[in-house]
Amino acid sequence: MIRCEHLRYAYPGDAFELVIDDFSVTKGGSVALVGPSGCGKSTFMNLISGLLVPQAGSILVDDVEVSRLALAERQRFRLTRIGLVPQNFELLDYLTVRENILLPFRIGAGLDREAAARCEELADRSGIAGHLGKYPDQLSQGERQRAALCRGLVTAAPLILADEPTGNLDPENQDRIVSLLLDEARRIGATVLMITHDPVLLPRFDRVVDVLALRKGGAA
Amino acid sequence: MNLAGVLYLGRRYLGRNRVKTALLVAAFTLVWLLPAGIALVVGKVEQQLRARALETPLLLGQAGSPLELVFNGLYFTKPAIATLPFGETEVVGADGLATVIPVYARYAAANHRIVGTTLDYFDYRGLPIREGRGLIDLGECVVGSEVAEKNGIAPGDSVISTPETLFDLAGVYPLKMRVVGVLAANGTPDDAAIFVDLKTAWIIEGLGHGHLDAEKLGEEAKLVGSSGNAEGAVRLNASVVQYNEVTEENVDDFHFHGEIADYPVTAAIVIPADAKAQALLKGRYGKAGGLQLISPEAEMDELFATVFSVQDLVLRLLGVIGFATLAIGALVFLLSNRLRRGEFRHLLHLGADPGTLRALIAFEAAFVIVASCLLAAAGLAILQAIAPVLVRQLLG
């Protein structure tokens, strides 16, 4: 599903350099990315999603070499093949919860009945069905993160990238979010890559990869 | 992002931030509407004032403000101007140099000016009667179309002149006038006027009045020990009731005291026989100290030279204010977009392409501009529709 080889990325004018020789994840697997702050976890995830383009090496996602795609193709690829779950929810305050969940369809090919039905189904499973008509500022932190998670899952993308989705939540909500994420990914056969700092959550994943160790030459 | 998506997100953003959007639209609307509206209203005022002035070659009045004379004689405003004796109007026309139409526009009824004049006025202005007939007898009136519509007046009804001072017992008494005709609308001040014969206007003034024949009254109605009266004249006391309406039964009891030639008029329209007569008259009255003979067109030229210079200044100021408003609007927009940077970044992360994000921002800006232009256009259309009423109020 994901294969990275001889990957090198450095931010312009910054001493930081991310070098990863070998990293792969099989289809349907779940991987927790760990490591200290600033070690390059988010950079690595952004390279996989095509938001950043490596200076060297290759990234294959579902046999598509993301690093070789043109900007428009990368945007389309991310929209259709990747479900993103950000740390800070990133819900648009002028859209209702329902509209936020369906946002990938609004900015993509357009909304259809199937998408609307999937939105209802996900909201129901995540316990926010009663909040679909509300605006984000009317929800609690946990409810907002569940809404953000539903948005990441609504396209049923084969790859889900979650950047510390439980970072701002209490333990109860952390557990709920991770359970939802992994259960839904398993249900649709999606691969999951999630950044986390919480050791309690690690046993829930198939693999745990320390990005700092990965940069020092380890293969994963 | 597809176009439908851009429109959807743009619409939702504007709708959710409707106060900010409404304020921006309102500010931009004023930027477009104010200069255009001022130009439109001034243009309409000029059009109406000039049209009337062009139709009136010369205007005779008592010496004073020529502009006030124009406004009284042509637009029936400024009722308090100095009057000239009716005899003077006859003098102007006596040697065949001109046709003279006296105008006495001083009193009012139901907030409309009562204009005392002669039948020549209707011929000269080309005022056809839409309903009823023209003036024939004393105490009759013909009303303009607007007067009829506003007050629901038709031939057979009556209007009562408004007393000038309610508590002045020696002042002007109200006169009930029979409406005998309604004029066709012509979009001029004639529409809002009540026309009466000059003599009827003088009755309102108190120069003519009607009461029972003194010879038929009993002794109790007469004052004893009169002084200052002509020999043989009878002085009546307050028990004698004056008529406040001219009817078929009492019309013969109405009479005027003093010389008609001394009776007042506020202005006289002078229509010279030819250019030579016009030059002669101008020369004659240019030297006369007590009267003025003016060209309304020249007065309007002078007035609008001043109005346009003021308008020009106002428009320049509005231009500066408009520029500042647009600049502030642009700043609000830019700051708002800066605050939304996270939102745009996230849309990009989700897969929206940068071009359509620019389209989203452009849509929101275009909405404010287009909406304000449409509102300004609607405002202008409304102004255009109400301009005649507005102009009349401005002149009143």
Image (cartoon, helix red, strand yellow):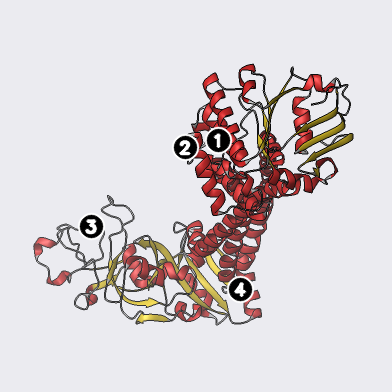
**Residue at image coords 64%, 17%:** A199
In the image, A29 versus B235, the foreground residue is A29
Percent coordinates x, y for residue B384 in the rendering: 55, 63
Nearer to us: label 2 or label 3: 2
Q: How many C-alpha atoms fall within 10 Å of the one at disc 2: few (<14), some, or many (≥20)?
A: some
In percent of the image, x 63 and y 34: which residue is there? A90
**Which residue is under mark 4?**
B281
In this view of the protein, can residue A193 be seen by the observer? no
Query: Mark 4 against mark 2, which lies toward the viewer?
Result: 2
Front-most of B342 and B244? B342
Mark 2 or 1, nearer chain start: 2
**Residue at 62 percent of width and 79 percent of height:** B277
Q: Which mark is residue A147?
A: 1
Q: Secondary structure at mark 1?
A: helix
Q: Residues within 10 Å of mark 3 (few under 14, many from 20)?
A: few
- The disc placed on residue B227 is 3
* Quadrant hosting residue A26: top right
Q: Chain of mark 4?
A: B
The percent coordinates of residue A76 (x first, y second) are 73, 47
Helix, strand or loop for disc 3: loop
Q: Is residue A155 above or below residue A8?
A: below
Q: Earlier in the sequence, mark 4 or mark 3?
A: 3
Numbered disc 2: what chain? Answer: A
The residue type indicated by label 1 comes to Ala
State left or right for residue A9 relative to residue B337: right
Instruction: Write down the quadrant of residue B37 in the picture.
Output: bottom right
